[in-house]
Image (tube, rainbow, N blue to C red):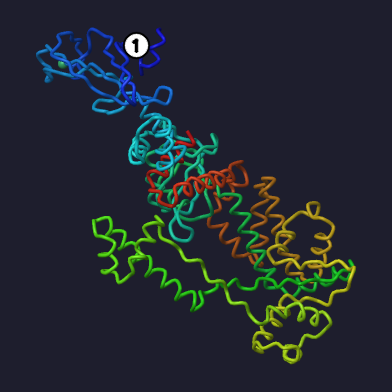
Amino acid sequence: MSYCSILLPDAAELRLTRVISESDFLAVEVEVARAVVPCPGCGRVCSRRHSYYVRTLADLPSHGVRVQLRLRTRKFFCDARACSRRIFTERLPRTAAPYARCSLRLSEAFRNIGFVAGAEAGARLARQLGMATSPDTLLRRMRQFVIGNGWIPRVLGVDDWAWRRGHRYGTILVDLERRSVVDLLPDRSAESFAAWLETHPGIEIISRDRAGCYAEGATQGAPQAVQVADRWHLLRNVSEALQRVVERERKQLISATATLHQELGAVAVVRVPCLPAVSRLPSRAEQSSQQKRNQRLASYREAMRLRQTGSTQEEVARKLALSTRTIRRWEQAGQFPERAPVPPKRKQIDRWVSYLERRWREGRSNALALWRELRQQGYRGSRGAVQRWATRQRQIALPPAVSGVPRLLFPSPRQATWWLLQEPAARDGKQNAFVNALEQLSPAIANVAQQAREFVSLLRERRPHQFAKWLERNQAGELRGFVKSLRQDEAAVRSALTLPWSNGQVEGHVHRLKLLKRQMFGRAKFDLLKQRVLYAAA
Ligand SMILES: [Zn+2]
C-alpha cells in the first residue's frame, strides 16, 4: 500500500491517479480499480463499457485542507436479456452512496460531530477542521443514522421524563441488564407503550412505576412479561402515607422538639413547618414592564424583518413610529437588547431590621408598640409593614437568644418522616432522641412509623412470605389507603419483593437525557433528541 493510498476512502476499490493542488483545496483524481462489475439489476458480471463521467465528492480534509475527490466513474452495458437495465453506473459501496455529494467517511464524520457537539456548534467546528458544511447538513446526517441492532432486552425499565415539567412528558425505555437506553417514545400513554412492546416481543420482565399507564400498556402489549413495581416508587408511597400522619400531628412535632431541647439544654429555633409555598404573583409594576417589553420585542422583530426585505432605516422608523437612532442601535446590537431590570424599591423598614431584631430578642413582641418606638426614632414607613415583619418573626418563632447556648432546628414533617422511616441504627444520637420523644408523645405516629419501617425492611430484605400478614395487619389502620393501592397492584408489588430489578438506574439515564435536551437549547425536535440519546447509548 503506497503512502498515497491513505488519501483514498477505500484502497481496494479505488486507485489514485493524480493529486492537484488548487488554490484552497486538494483535488484527488481517482479511478475505479476493478475491471468488471456486477449489474445492480440482475447481478451478472459485466465488462462492456458504455461511457464514463467524472463525479466529484467531498472527502475528509488533509492537514486541515479541504479535499475533493474527482472520481472517474464508468457506465456499463448489461447484456442479460431478462434484465430491465441496459445501462448502469457502477456502484462503490465502500466509497460513497449513490448520488451522494460526499464520501461515506466524511458523512460519518459529520454525523459524529453533530451528535457530540450539536448541529450549530458542530458545523462551526467542522468548518474549522476543513470540512465545509452547514447545520442543516449535520442534522440530515444525524437523522439518517440508523441506530439499534434489533436488540430486544430481556429486562426492561420504563419511566417518564419531562419535555417541559408539568406540561409534556415522554417515555424512556432502558435495558436494565445492559444498563443502556433502548428507545424513547414521544408521549406517556398506555397505547404507545403497548404498541412498542408488540413490535419488540420476547421481553420477560418489565420494571415500572406504580399502577398507571405503564402497567396498563405492559398488560396489553406484553401479557407474558412479569411486571415489577418499582421499589423507589413504593418507598416514596409509604413515606408519603407516613408523612400525612406526621403533618396531622404537627403539634406533637413541636412538643417533641421542645422536649429534646430541654434535655440537651439547647434553645429551639423553630422553623415553621410547611408554610404553603405560594408562588408569588408578579406585581403590577412587573406586569406592566413585561407588557412593555413584549411591545418592544414585537417592534424589534418587525423592524428587523422590514430591514431584511430591503426597507431603509428611515422607512422602517417612519412605519413603526420610532426614531432612526433606535433602529440603528438595534441593528448594531445584533440581537434584541434587553433592558436591565429595575431593582426592587428599598423599603423603609429594611433600614430598621437590626433595631427590630434586637428589641424582639429583648422581649418586645408587640407590633403596635414596636411601631410606636420606631416612629420616635424617625421611621416613616407604614404600621402594616411592622406588623408583617412581626408576623414573620412569630412564624420563625425566634426565641430569646441566650449567649453560648446552642440552637437546634425544628425538623420539617418531611425530615421527621425520613428519620422515622430509618432503622434506629441508621440515626444519630439526636435523631434517635427526637424520634423517641415524638413516638412517646404520639402513639398514632409511633404505630404508623413501626408499620412503615416493617414494610421498608420487607422490601429491602425481600421477604415476600411476610407480605400477606403485613397487608392484613394494616388493612384498617392509618395505612389503609396505601394498602388498598398495594392490593390493586399486588402481583407487581410481590415481584418487587422477590426480584432484584428496580428503576434506580433509569434516573441516571433521564438525567443524561435532560443534559442533552438542554444542550439543544430547547429547540429539540423529538426525533433528533432520540437520535442523540440512542447514539450516546450505542
Ligand atoms: Zn443486469
Whether the residue under disc 1 has CB within 8 Å of ligand 1: no
Q: Residue at x 13, y 18 (%)?
A: 87
Taking depth in this image into account, of 26 and 286 the one nearest to the observer is 26
Q: Secondary structure at mark 1?
A: loop
Taking depth in this image into account, of 171 and 444 the one nearest to the observer is 171
Residue 484 lies, with reference to residue 188, above or below; the image says below
Q: Is residue 151 left or right of residue 401?
A: left
Q: Is residue 178 left or right of residue 475?
A: left
Q: Amino acid at mark 1?
A: Ala
Q: Is residue 141 left or right of residue 456?
A: left
Q: Residue at x 49, y 38 (%)?
A: 204
Image position, residue 72 (x, y; %) = 23, 16
Image position, residue 126 (x, y; %) = 41, 34
Q: Residue at x 47, y 48 (%)?
A: 517
**Residue bearing mark 1:** 12
How many numbered tags mark residues here? 1
**Callout 1: few (<14), some (14-19), or many (20+) C-alpha neighbours within 10 Å?**
few
- Quarter placement of the N terminus: top left
Image position, residue 528 (x, y; %) = 39, 43
Residue 405 lies, with reference to residue 201, above or below; the image says below
